[in-house]
Each structure stands twice: as structure tokens, then as C-alpha cells.
Amino acid sequence: MHNYLRVALAAAMTMACAFTARADQTEYDPTKISDSLKAIFQFGSVQTKQALNANTVTLISGTIGGTYVQFGADLASVLDDGNKLRVLPIVGRGSVQSVADILFLQGVDLGIVRSDTLDFLERKGFAKDIKKQFTYVTKLYNEEMHVLAAKSVRNLKELDGKTISVDLPNGGTFVTALTVFERLGMKPNVVYIEQRIAMEKLKKGEIDAVIVCGGRPYKSVSTFKDDRFHLVHVDYDKALQGDYLPATLSSADYPNLIANGERVDTIAVPAVLAAYNWAPNTDRYRKLATFVDAFFAKFPAFQNPPFHPKWKEVSLAAPLAGWNRLPVAQQWLDQHGVEPVARQRFETFLKQSPAAAAKVQSDADKEALFRQFQAWEAERNARAQATTGKQR
């Protein structure tokens, strides 16, 4: 009996490989079932189940319509490789929930979280030494803070004491919003309302502002239409420079909310592809190693259409202050000579710019300046890519 099961599994694998080999040679018919799935249905066994689960990596993403979900779909689209690797994205409920899911939910191997979430949980006393339980595969992209308010409001600080919606608890927007309020000494009346409902309440005058943190162009913001409202400036105050990056939103991003040719200053927070800190000799670590090898090797594919434009901001080797990188990810980068080129260019910039170097009086000043340099370079590269895409 066992021999028959092994033969059946081998047949399924062989048929899957044969299908993959000729996939680019024949026209795909969406009404047909693939040969690999036919083999599984016909010859599937306990061993088949074990083999499929052994090579499936589960990724907790974010809420419907958000950037996290799109990134999860992109990863599955590029990395799924027959029986060698399958990436299974799951719709999540936001950054705080994803942290809990990575820690405690069975079968969750990876998740996308915001870099300020773990610090927030520790600062509020909800967790202790939580960063030791996490590693990161790579820093992804920067998520901009969008503040929607009446056109009479020009700056976030003008909303002090006003009623502001910061999305639902357990997400990531409320974490960033509350942290920013705290750092700026603001005391608004915070309400937790789902974004679409909050925007309707804003139109009715029931609240004064809505904050949305997500990668631009963020769908719920880009589809918001009401001439009475616009996007509000968020100054890059010194109190915010330890955790956040400077960013800008343009009329090209949000023509309904920013006048033609104008820009709105704001801040951004990095999104992180994170994992539990599994021991190297575990099967869960092996699965992460399989994912890393495929993801890093195929990474250039993500930076071209039709994938999300935010992939253009991703630099695999970019360091993330206060986080430990997954060892197998760092080993891959070292073996392939991938270095954080932005840091190298920044050091060259300082050497060639005495005026900028003169402003650096401490390590904290240097790190703050580097963050501004990173944000400027990411925006420049993204806009250059967008211009190239239009020319094509």
C-alpha cells in the first residue's frame, strides 16, 4: 500500500512538472483544470497532503483594498512554482492584528506590519521584549499618512482638540496616528471608525478629519470626491524624526484632493515583511528559507508592471533600525553581494556636500538626515519609473 502511495505522489509531481514545462508553449485555457491538480484529485494521498503543506508559505496581509493585500497577491503571482513553493496570502485586519497572528496563529509564516507597531505595543505595556520574538525578511515600502479635512484646515496641528477618525482598533493607522499626536503634544478627540464610514461622516460634518495610513495612491483616498475637502500638510517635526520619514503627496497621486501641480508634505512609516524568530533547525525556518531564496532571486520582476508601483521603493538590503534580520535572508544578501546602496550613496553625498555635513552634530542628526535622503531618493526613483512607463 505504501509503495502505491509513493508511486501516486510521484505521478502527481511528474505531471505537475510536465505541465509547468509546457505552460509557456501552449495557450492557457481557463476552463480547464491543470494537469497538476488532476493528478492530485486522482492520486492524492496522505503523502500528497504532507508534501503540499511542506512547501506552502502562508502570508497574513491586510484589509481589502489596502496595499498589503496587493503585495500579497503579487508575491503569490510571481513565486508560486508548482509543488516547489506556494505562497498563500490571507486577508488580515491590520498591523496590530498581524503581529498577534504571526505570534500565535497556527500556520502563519509571514506577515506585513508597520515598523512602529512593535514599539507602540511595548511603550503602552501590552508586550515586553516583543522585538526579540520577530525577525524581518526585508523592509518593504513607505506608507504615507493622509489627513483628510476641510480646506480651511492647512496643517495637522490645527486639528488639535478636534474630532479625528483613526480607523478601527487592531489596525496600523491608529498606532501611527496616536504616536504622532503624542509626539506633537496634540490632544484631539479620537474616534475609531472604519474608513469608508468615516469619510461619509466627514462629508456630513459629524467629524473634523479622517486619517489614513497606506501606500500612495491609496484606493479609498483616491476615490474620495468632495470639493469641500483636501489633504492636509503634516510637518516633519524633530519629534517625529526618530520613527518616521518625510514624504510628499502630489496632484498626480490625488487629483481630486490636491490642486494641479501642487504638493502636500506629510510623513511616512515603513512597512516590514516580518516573521516569527524560529530556530534554524525547525521546519518553519526551512519554509522561510525556501521563500527567501525564491523571493530574492525573482525580486527584479516585482519592479515592473503590472505589479504595485510601491515595489519600486523596495531595497532588499535596506537596514531597519531596532530589528534583527532573518539570518537566512542576511546570508542570501551576503552571498550574492547585495548591499544597502542607499547608505553608500548617502556617505558619498556627505563627503561631497560640506554644507550638509556641517549640520551633522551627532549620530542622531546623521540618522535623521539619512532618513530624509532615503525618502527623497525613493520618491525620485518612483517618479522616474513612472515617467519612463508613460514614455513607453
Image (cartoon, rainbow, N blue to C red):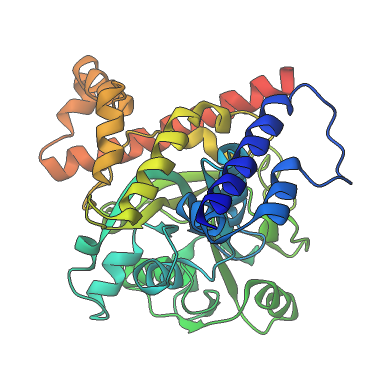
x%, y% of residue 144? 50, 52
x%, y% of residue 9? 58, 47
Above or below, comparing residue 63 to residue 204 in the picture: above
| Residue 325 visible (yes or no) | yes
Q: Is residue 34 left or right of residue 310?
A: right
Judging depth in this view, the residue of 301 and 294 nearest the camera is: 294
Question: Where is residue 297, by image quadrant?
Answer: top left
x%, y% of residue 175? 40, 70
Split into 4 quadrants, where in the image is the N terminus?
bottom right
Judging depth in this view, the residue of 341 and 38 nearest the camera is: 38
Question: Where is residue 194, by image quadrant?
Answer: bottom right
Q: Is residue 289 left or right of residue 309?
A: left
Question: Where is residue 367, by image quadrant?
Answer: top left
| Residue 215 visible (yes or no) | no
Judging depth in this view, the residue of 8 and 37 nearest the camera is: 8
Above or below, comparing residue 40 to residue 153 in the picture: above
Q: Is residue 38 left or right of residue 356?
A: right
x%, y% of residue 385? 59, 25
List the single residue furthest toward the left: 362
Split into 4 quadrants, where in the image is the C terminus?
top right
